[in-house]
Image: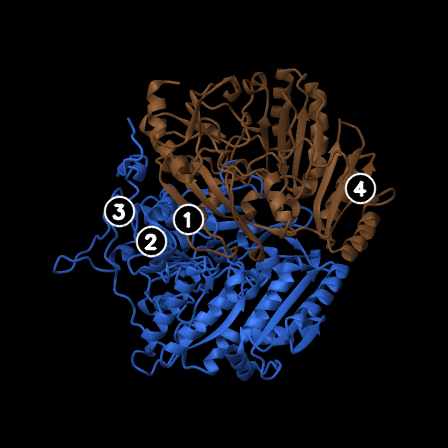
């Protein structure tokens, strides 16, 4: 760590440590790690870093810090794990306000004491700030959406050190712009999230999974989409196919009061057809391979989104291009919500993986050059991949509204301080 | 186009509570090019309307003669939206038929540095579509095609002038509905709903407009036509749909909307419970929420609003009730049945003196009649009134209602009737006054403002669904600090740097976008106090 940074950060009150090899992000080594314990300390860190013209990468649990393109530059990691207080759980209002470093597991435990929960899927070790910044979501997205849908208030430190709040602690609120939505999924490129306020949901009295394996993708697709569109109020509609051509496992999650869920589970089993079973436990593949799980270590994880009616065509396209590219993708995800995750083993050849991604973009029609006048109806994004794959494929692909996103970035972070190079279009 | 909207103050020349506002002086536009005021009067002062008059030929070319309104009498049709206390006749009105025409209109305005304001059905309650006398009003009501319905993907693509309810009607044959349902859903437009992030009685369970918008085609304030999002709800990059929705027309004009469709619930049931007081009703709400039940809607009315509704629509609510609670449950049949039994018990536990249950649509409509008529009904018991919109945490409802009651008792000639979405703490106090008494309007205005103070003190919001518009921009500083507002303005500057797009709304003071926000204008407080030394 240079003397310059050491001196600048020393006065902020934040704990500051020399960065070690474990702090490197995709091969980019930071000079130091700051651990602010308060919003004031976080603001002090940001002011000090900006004053030196250096760059910052916010970090939560660090579980997905390597996702996305590597940072163009990273002088200081701002580690938020010391800000780990649950500031307010207003159970009567179904609202919780927490510091960014609170983990999802820690939060769930406190909320469960009052029969409540944050209705999104995330790794228990993930921090709430990280979940918001990454826009993490899993199977529950079908019914509850993603972190942007549950976030009702936010506190951020801007790259210039100013602390800003948006939203509030009531669910229904249209006063001012919803800056929280802008930060949800922004991957640390606009500022440092220090606090988040969420709306909560009651824990379901009963949760049941109705599952069935299908020999062919077409029948599976039809069943899952019928389940998602039925009035039986599915909370999640997932599929899993471990390799091309393999049987497709389908699972529908039902939640609610006990008598209602039991009755719905019977009807849902009827809808899925012969061999469908209801169980209290999720199938082993549930929510694996996605944003909420650990992801394939060293491998490639691709997220494909599409209008749900295209499900069968997308599954067929994955099969077809996998054969051409010579790779073996495993598919898993929220088919009913039009989101699938494709994992490719670390052992796959990097060039073949790149060919697969490009071919999938072409086959699904989501690889066109930025034609902002046409509705894209889907995307193929590489969430994480080995450096060798990253070298030959654009991880983000075409992004609608990119010019406006650049304008937003210029306004919020004109000095390019925050996580440069990690976002869509090189933002 | 000469017809006067029925809610726009009656016939021409009728007495109005407030005269049309004079022409606004031009707002500073540091980087705005081109002449703003091409014509000057004999004193060298700008002539209001001259800049917009100069645009008539180009607008006529774009929208056709039938799509341009310039006759001063006709322009007055558009002088206000649902908030009739603010009025300004627009300089010019255009009625485009297509997104491309909207883009061309905006480009023409931008080239001439003329401000423009978008308007849907004009039902907004915060003056968000209040025109500019020196600007162009872009009315989207001719763009009312439902372009696509995809029941398997549960999506529809609609134009901005499509009315909210007509989306639900169009998709009902497929077994779906469009969930956000503002009270004005028969007439309000989906484009306006996007601008305001409209809610409705059922947003407690089903969410707001922002939760149901998956893609937006917009015209930027520069006149570019482009899509935000891709209709999936999982589009890569910043969530510009989330940022745009609820921005009250200040970031651009929406020209197509991809909406999410929700499966029609199998069963809907409605309970009406009468209580001695709003406090007892509030207890019932807490018990219901505490039991883990999420009704589609929980509405409450106090004695005064019940009296008004009774006078207007003879809704036959239980006589002598201090409060009525309307609880609607929807969902799968078995779930609804179980919840209905539970809600009934919880209302009894909270001291309900009478409970009625309605399962079929006609009975439900009878229960809702009183609630839905409430706003208009207070006209029966008061010559004039102000509709307020504030939010408190649900658990603070009783306390805030008691304070509102104290407040109204302390002001001569002002009464407050309370109608509210109790489930999410969204109050709609109706401040009643007699506008024939001098000073009564002012007193009512003050009470109305003090109610917002109570909401803020309780940790709530100055608006739950009506928006800030021109009506509440002065309250924004009570809820947000300078840095908060400055940060919101960064977003505005990214989309609308010249501030030609709906200027004067939402924010109390404009921010000049030429400044570079990354440059420190003052030392950080920690540095100033000596706690932090930078070098």
Q: Kindly check if marks 1 and 4 are in contact, taking CB atoms under 8 A apart as contact.
A: no
Q: Which mark is residue B503?
A: 2
Where's residue A371, x and y in %? 50, 35
Residue found farthest to the right: A274
**Where B128 falls versus A323 (above or below)?**
below
Q: Looking at the image, is mark 2 or mark 1 earlier in the sequence? A: 1
Q: Which residue is mark 4?
A: A211
Q: Which residue is mark 1?
A: B252
The residues tagged by marks 3 and 1 sit, at their Cα atoms, a distance apart of 17 Å
Q: Kindly check if marks 2 and 4 are in contact, taking CB atoms under 8 A apart as contact.
A: no
Where's residue B290, x and y in %? 63, 59
Q: Give the side of residue A145 with respect to residue A184, left or right.
A: right
Where's residue A299, x and y in %? 64, 21
The residues tagged by marks 2 and 3 sit, at their Cα atoms, a distance apart of 11 Å
Q: Quadrant of residue B26?
A: bottom left
- Which one is in front in this view, the residue at disc 1 or the one at disc 4? 4
Q: Chain of mark 1?
A: B
Q: Looking at the image, is mark 2 or mark 3 earlier in the sequence? A: 3
Q: Residue at x 61, y 80 (%)?
A: B317
Q: Kindly check if marks 3 and 1 are in contact, taking CB atoms under 8 A apart as contact.
A: no
**Where B438 falls versus B151 (above or below)?**
below
The residues tagged by marks 2 and 4 sit, at their Cα atoms, a distance apart of 54 Å
Q: Which residue is mark 3?
A: B29
Judging from the image, what is the letter of the chain drawn in blue?
B
Where's residue B87, x and y in %? 34, 67
Q: Chain of mark 2?
A: B
SS category of the residue bearing label 2: loop
The C terminus of chain A is located in which quarter?
Answer: top left
């Amino acid at each position: 760590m240079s003397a310059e940074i050491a001196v600048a950060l020393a006065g902020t009150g934040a704990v500051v440590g020399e960065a070690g090899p474990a702090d490197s992000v995709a091969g980019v080594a930071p000079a130091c790690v700051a651990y602010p314990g308060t919003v004031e300390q976080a603001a002090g860190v940001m002011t000090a870093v900006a004053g030196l013209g250096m760059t910052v990468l916010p970090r939560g649990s660090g579980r997905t810090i390597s996702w996305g393109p590597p940072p163009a530059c990273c002088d200081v990691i701002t580690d938020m794990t010391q800000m780990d207080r649950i500031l307010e759980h207003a159970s009567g209002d179904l609202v919780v306000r927490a510091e960014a470093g609170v983990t999802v597991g820690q939060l769930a435990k406190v909320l469960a004491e009052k029969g409540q929960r944050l209705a999104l899927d995330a790794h228990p070790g993930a921090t709430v700030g990280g979940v918001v910044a990454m826009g993490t979501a899993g199977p529950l997205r079908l019914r509850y959406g993603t972190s942007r849908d549950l976030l009702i208030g936010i506190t951020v430190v801007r790259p210039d050190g100013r602390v800003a709040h948006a939203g509030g602690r009531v669910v229904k609120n249209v006063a001012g712009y919803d800056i929280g939505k802008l930060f949800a999924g922004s991957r640390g490129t606009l500022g440092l999230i220090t606090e988040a306020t969420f709306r909560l949901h009651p824990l379901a009295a009963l949760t049941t999974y109705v599952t069935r394996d299908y020999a062919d993708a077409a029948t599976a697709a039809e069943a899952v989409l019928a389940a998602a569109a039925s009035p039986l109020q599915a909370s999640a509609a997932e599929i899993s196919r471990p390799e091309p051509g393999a049987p497709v496992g389908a699972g529908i999650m039902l939640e609610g009061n006990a008598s209602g869920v039991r009755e719905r589970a019977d009807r849902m089993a009827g809808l899925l057809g012969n061999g469908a079973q209801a169980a209290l436990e999720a199938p082993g593949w549930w929510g694996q391979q996605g944003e909420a799980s650990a992801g394939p270590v060293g491998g490639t994880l691709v997220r494909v989104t599409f209008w749900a009616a295209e499900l069968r065509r997308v599954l067929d396209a994955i099969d077809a291009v996998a054969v051409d590219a010579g790779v073996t993708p495993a598919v898993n995800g929220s088919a009913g919500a039009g989101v699938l995750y494709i994992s490719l083993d670390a052992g796959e050849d990097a060039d073949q993986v790149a060919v697969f991604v490009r071919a999938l973009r072409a086959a699904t029609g989501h690889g066109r050059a930025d034609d902002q006048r046409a509705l894209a109806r889907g995307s193929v994004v590489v969430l994480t991949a080995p450096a060798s794959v990253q070298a030959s494929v654009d991880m983000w692909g075409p992004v609608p509204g990119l010019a406006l996103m650049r304008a937003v970035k210029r306004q919020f972070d004109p000095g390019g301080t925050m996580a440069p190079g990690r976002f869509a279009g090189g933002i | 186009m000469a017809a006067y909207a029925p809610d726009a103050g009656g016939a021409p020349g009728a007495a109005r509570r407030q005269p049309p506002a004079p022409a606004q002086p031009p707002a500073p536009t540091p980087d705005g090019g081109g002449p703003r005021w091409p014509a000057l009067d004999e004193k060298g002062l700008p002539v209001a309307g001259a800049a917009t008059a100069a645009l008539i030929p180009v607008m006529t070319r774009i929208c056709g003669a039938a799509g341009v309104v310039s006759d001063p009498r006709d322009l007055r049709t558009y002088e206000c939206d649902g908030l009739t206390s603010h009025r300004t006749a627009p300089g010019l009105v255009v009625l485009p038929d297509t997104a491309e025409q909207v883009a061309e209109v905006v480009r023409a305005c931008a080239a001439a540095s003329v401000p423009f304001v978008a308007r849907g059905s004009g039902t907004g309650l915060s003056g968000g579509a209040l025109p500019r006398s020196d600007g162009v009003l872009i009315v989207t009501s001719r763009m009312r095609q439902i372009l696509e319905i995809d029941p398997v993907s549960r999506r529809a693509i609609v134009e901005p002038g499509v009315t909210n309810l007509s989306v639900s009607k169009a998709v009902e044959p497929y077994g779906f509905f469009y969930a956000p349902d503002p009270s004005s859903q028969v007439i309000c437009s989906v484009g306006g709903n996007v601008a305001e992030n409209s809610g409705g009685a059922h947003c407690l369970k089903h969410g707001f407009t922002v939760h149901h918008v998956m893609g937006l085609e917009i015209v930027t304030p520069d006149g570019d036509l482009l899509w935000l999002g891709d209709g999936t709800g999982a589009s890569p990059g910043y969530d510009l749909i989330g940022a745009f929705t609820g921005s009250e027309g200040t970031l651009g004009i929406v020209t197509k909307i991809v909406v999410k469709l929700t499966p029609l619930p199998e069963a809907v049931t409605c309970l009406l419970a009468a209580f001695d007081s709003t406090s007892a009703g509030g207890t019932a709400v807490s018990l219901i929420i505490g039991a883990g039940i999420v009704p589609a809607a929980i509405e409450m009315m106090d004695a005064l609003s019940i009296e008004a509704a009774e006078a207007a629509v003879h809704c036959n609510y239980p006589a002598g009730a201090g409060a009525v609670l309307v609880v609607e449950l929807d969902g799968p049949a078995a779930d609804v049945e179980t919840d209905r039994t539970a809600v009934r018990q919880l209302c009894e536990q909270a001291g309900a003196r009478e409970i009625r249950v309605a399962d079929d649509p006609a009975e439900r409509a009878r229960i809702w009649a009183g609630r839905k008529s409430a706003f208009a009904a207070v006209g029966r018991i008061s010559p004039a009134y102000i509709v307020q919109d504030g939010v408190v945490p649900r658990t603070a409802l009783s306390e805030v209602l008691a304070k509102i009651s104290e407040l109204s008792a302390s002001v001569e000639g002002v009464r407050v009737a309370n109608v509210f979405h109790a489930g999410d703490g969204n109050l709609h106090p109706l401040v009643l006054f007699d506008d024939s008494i001098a000073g009564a309007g002012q007193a009512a205005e003050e009470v109305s403002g003090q109610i917002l103070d109570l909401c803020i003190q309780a940790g709530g919001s100055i608006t739950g669904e009506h928006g800030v518009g021109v009506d509440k921009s002065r309250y924004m500083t009570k809820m947000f600090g300078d840095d908060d507002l400055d940060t919101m303005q960064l977003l505005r500057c990214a989309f609308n740097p010249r501030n030609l797009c709906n200027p004067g709304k939402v924010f109390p003071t404009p921010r000049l976008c030429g400044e570079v926000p990354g440059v420190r204008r003052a030392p950080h407080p920690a540095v100033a106090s000596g706690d932090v030394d930078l070098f």
